[in-house]
Image: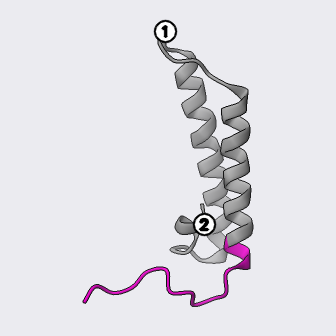
Amino acid sequence: MWWCAMGYSTRGWRGLSVLLAGLGLALEFCQSMTEYRVASSGDVIANLAGVVLGYWLARQTPAGFPVFRQAE
């Protein structure tokens, strides 16, 4: 979330966090549909915690932080 948020304006962060949280939920749902994978509520919680932590870190990062550098 943090790295992705650095490429978007702050207005797009909420949408990005919802998208990433939804992706985590969708992956767990898809795992439950297979015979060889198991969906886990712990994985869902870990995914959501990662999105929340990334969102918080993105808000703490100062504007102009050099995440993306031009190749030399």
Percent from the top left, x then y, of residue 9?
60, 77
Q: Residue at x 66, y 76 (%)?
A: 10
Asked if residue 56 is among those painted magenta in the image, a careful observer would answer no
> Which disc is residue 62 wearing?
none
Task: Give percent across and percent down for residue 33.
Answer: 53, 15
- Which residue is at the front of the view, 66 or 25? 66
**Which mark is first along the chain, 1 or 2?**
2
Q: Which residue is mark 1?
A: 35
Q: Residue at x 72, y 31 (%)?
A: 42
Q: Quadrant of residue 44?
A: top right
Q: Nearer the viewer, residue 21 or 35?
A: 35
Residue ID for mark 2: 2
Tell me the kind of residue under disc 2: Trp
Residue count near mark 2 (Cα–Cα under 10 Å), binned few <14, some 14–19, many ≥20: many
Quadrant of the rendering where the C terminus is positioned: bottom left
Mark 2 → mark 1, Cα distance in angstroms: 33 Å
Residue drawn at 66 percent across, 62 percent down: 54
Describe the element under mark 1 as helix, strand or loop.
loop
Q: Are marks 2 and 1 in contact (CB under 8 Å)?
A: no
Q: Main secondary structure of the magenta part?
A: loop
**Extent of the magenta region:** 58-72
In the displayed image of the protein, which residue is found farthest to the top? 35
